[in-house]
Amino acid sequence: MITYEWLYILAGSFFAVWSLLSLRDTANNKRLGNAAFWGLLAASFLFGSHLPDFGNGLLVLAMVGIAGAGGLGRSNPETTSLEERFNFSALLGNKLFLPALIVPVTAVAGTLLYNYTPLGDTGLFEERRETLILFGVGVVFALAAAMVWLKAPVMAPAEEGRRLLDSIGWAAILPQMLAALGAVFALAGVGDVIGSLAGQIIPDGSVLLTVIVFALGMALFTMIMGNAFAAFPVMAAAIGIPLLVEGYGGNPAVIGAVGMLAGFCGTLMTPMAANFNIVPAALLELKDQNGVIKQQIGTAIPLWVCNVAIIYVAGFLLWN
Amino acid sequence: MNYWPLAGIAIVVAGFALRFNPLLVVVSAALATGLLAGLEFVSVVEALGAAFNDNRYISVTWIILPVIGLLERYGLQQRARGLIESVRGATMGKLLVIYLIFRQLTAAIGMKDIGGHPQAVRPLVAPMAEAAAEKSHGKLPDAEREKVLAMSAATDNVGLFFGEDIFFAIASILLIQGVFESAGYPLTPLQLSVWAIPTAICAFLIHGGRILAMDRRLGRLPE
């Protein structure tokens, strides 16, 4: 049976290659930090299942220490020039989109085939894990197809991938870290505490009002923190899971997915999300640094109302 | 009831708002929450390590970077620009609505870096929208010109935010999955990502409608 462990070995070897390439990259004066950070992540993928919990905890603390001390730098691996890229794009045309399409097509078509044909009876994949495993398969197919088609140098995918990874930097593990925070919150009973507090404030039995408080909390926390990812574990532990799912028996998939999107409406309205809202105002040389936000409020508010309606209708009325 | 673990939430909110390194904020919040709930330091580190290890699948998504990077090496960004440029000559409303759907659809199949403010909005979308608006409505007053540019950037954001979650292998979807799984509710990425579709349609209708309304309003400006 193919499990996540296979996927972790694949990802672990990618990160190990990136760590080694970082180590060799003398043009980056923080190369040791990069090599150590991606090396630790590779170790987590390759050996995490065999390490004791405390060892994995120390590994996390070490990665956070490197990132917190500013130990990561941006790399600039050798690549094609802008002019060469223009020429290639004219030569290759819209077919350039095709290799990227292989990934979602493999994963979605594979998942459908696996679940709705007798293929599923073979038990080839670990239960509920088939989509992400097939995503990994799709990446391998897409890489192979692109390499054969483009006849690229052998190390090109690794170096180009490293360029993109280093532009993301430590933020690459932030979502995983936030999910871990959610688990620690659950262990410490944060959800129970807030659930009981909120239960006293929100009138008993009002599903719609609870949905509104949940979606409003997502949007407001996102506006304060500038990040819906950070707001999600907090609001899920506080209201989403204890009240909406457990208390009122709502559909967890709708509450999770659309709750996150209610947070995205908050992202449209906050200067704290500088990359999306303040940086473009500067790039476009607007006089008003909040000019972009002002154009977004008119979309964000009605869309937030839509999200509340979707959670209420699809998560409760149609579900029960 | 022990209310102290709530301090962890306060740390997350304050730490992000004060712009500390988010990884430091998150780990401090986790350690503080565990200690205040009465756990030993070693057990908190163990809990954090176990939870990080259980959620490794969220970071698996980065293995797509070599594919995207390789295609960029051979001009993916330039081809996307070519596609956007091919609608030159359209009205400002039509141009931005087409860009909105283009951004939503490419993000929905995992190509979220194909647009963006430095790569597409500043060099391409904003100047094209401005030129199209002036072609239909004549020279714009400064305040209106700024609104057209700002609307171009807004369209990029709306298209990205309300397209990307349709792609199942994206961090936000897997984060939702991780949080619910930790709480005892196993979900699959596709179960979650299909629920991004209704909101994506609403976003297209609302924002698309606002773009077209702006184009009409510019046409009614007094000369």
Image (spheres, coloured by chain):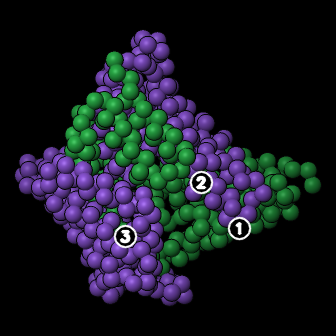
Q: Residue furthest right?
A: B223
Total marks in image: 3
- Residue A211 % position (x, y): 46, 25
- The quadrant holding residue A78 is bottom left
Horizontal and vertical percent position of residue A191: 35, 27
Q: Is residue A224 visible?
A: yes
- Whether callout 1 and callout 3 share a subunit is answered no
Residue beneath the point at 45% across and 63% down: A70
Residue in view at x 71 percent, y 54 percent: A289
- The residue at 57%/57% (across/down) is A275
What is the quadrant of residue A231 in the picture?
A: top left
- Which disc is residue B5 wearing? none
Q: CA distance from mark 2 to mark 1?
A: 22 Å
- Disc 3 residue type? Gly
Where is A309 relative to A72, above or below? above
Secondary structure category for the residue under label 3: helix
For disc 3, the neighbor class at 10 Å (few under 14, some 14 to 19, many from 20) is many
Q: Which residue lies at the image location 33% right of the left edge and 83% below the top edge?
A: A24
Q: Pointer 1 indicates a residue of which chain?
A: B
The residue labelled by disc 2 is A274
Q: Is residue A252 above or below residue B12?
A: above
Which amino acid, mark 1? Answer: Pro
Among the chains pictured, the one given purple colouring is: A
Give the colour chain B carries in the figure. green
Q: Which of the two discs, 1 and 3, sits closer to the camera?
A: 3
Q: Is residue A310 left or right of residue A45?
A: right
Residue A196: where, in percent of width, then height?
Answer: 38, 18
Determine which residue is flagged by label 3.
Answer: A33
Do the residues bearing badges 2 and 1 touch, measured as CB atoms within 8 Å?
no
The three-letter amino acid code for the residue at tag 2 is Ala
- Of the image marks 3 and 2, the number of the one nearer the N terminus: 3
